[in-house]
Image (cartoon, helix red, strand yellow):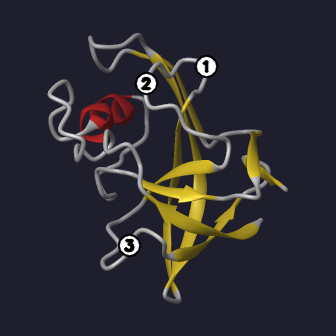
Amino acid sequence: MTITAKIIPGHGAASGKKGDHRYPGGTIAIQAPYFKKLGLDLTRYHPGTLNIDISPFNYQIKNPKYFFNQVEWTKHIPPENFYFFDVTVSYKMIEHKGLVYMPDPKTKTEHEQSKTTLELILPKIDEIIYGDIITISVNKNQLELLP
């Protein structure tokens, strides 16, 4: 399924822009070694997330590419579950392959997201800014986008 989405500001936790002393360098940089041990290598991606607004769509989790249960990646919050789904982003007519990164809303204790926001892990995309419109494609068998 392919839709358009808008780049929006996130909480700044994933990239470390928030400056949270508990997560120097950001949560993705801290989580990446745990994910690698579980079979997902994130080294080719930018260590942060690109947040997008998919409204008027929301999502339904189907069959994630990866699901990690009760990952104890920090002492500051309880263990979390994580979902990852394939995504292809088209920006300025260039395609970028990546992942939808989704801490399980049932186990995530901080930085709640709306059902119309997705976080993407991608290679660094130069010049992309808040407000830009992108096209995303997801595998509806992994993550279904619902109007």
9 vs 13: above or below: below
In front of the other: 4 or 63: 4
The residue labelled by disc 3 is 129
Counting from the top left corner in percent of width and height, residue 51 is at 48, 55
Q: Residues within 10 Å of mark 3 (few under 14, many from 20)?
A: few
Please say if the residues under marks 2 and 1 sit with CB atoms less than 8 Å apart. no
Q: Which residue is mark 1?
A: 106
The location of residue 63, given as percent across then percent down, is 73, 39
Where in the figure is residue 99, as x and y percent of width and height? 51, 53
Q: Alpha carbon of mark 2 to alpha carbon of mark 1: how far?
A: 11 Å
User: Between residues 122 and 129, which one lies in front from this camera angle?
Assistant: 129
Gap between marks 3 and 1, in whole Å? Answer: 30 Å
Dividing the picture into quadrants, the one containing residue 41 is top left
Q: At numbered mark 1, what does the secondary structure look like: helix, strand or loop?
A: loop
Residue 103 position in % (x across, y down): 51, 31
- The crowding category of the residue bearing disc 1, from other C-alpha atoms within 10 Å (few below 14, some 14 to 19, many at least 20), is few
Looking at the image, which is closer to me, 59 or 100? Answer: 59
Q: Earlier in the sequence, mark 2 or mark 3?
A: 2
Task: Using the numbered discs, state the Cα–Cα distance from disc 2 to disc 3 in whole angstroms.
Answer: 25 Å
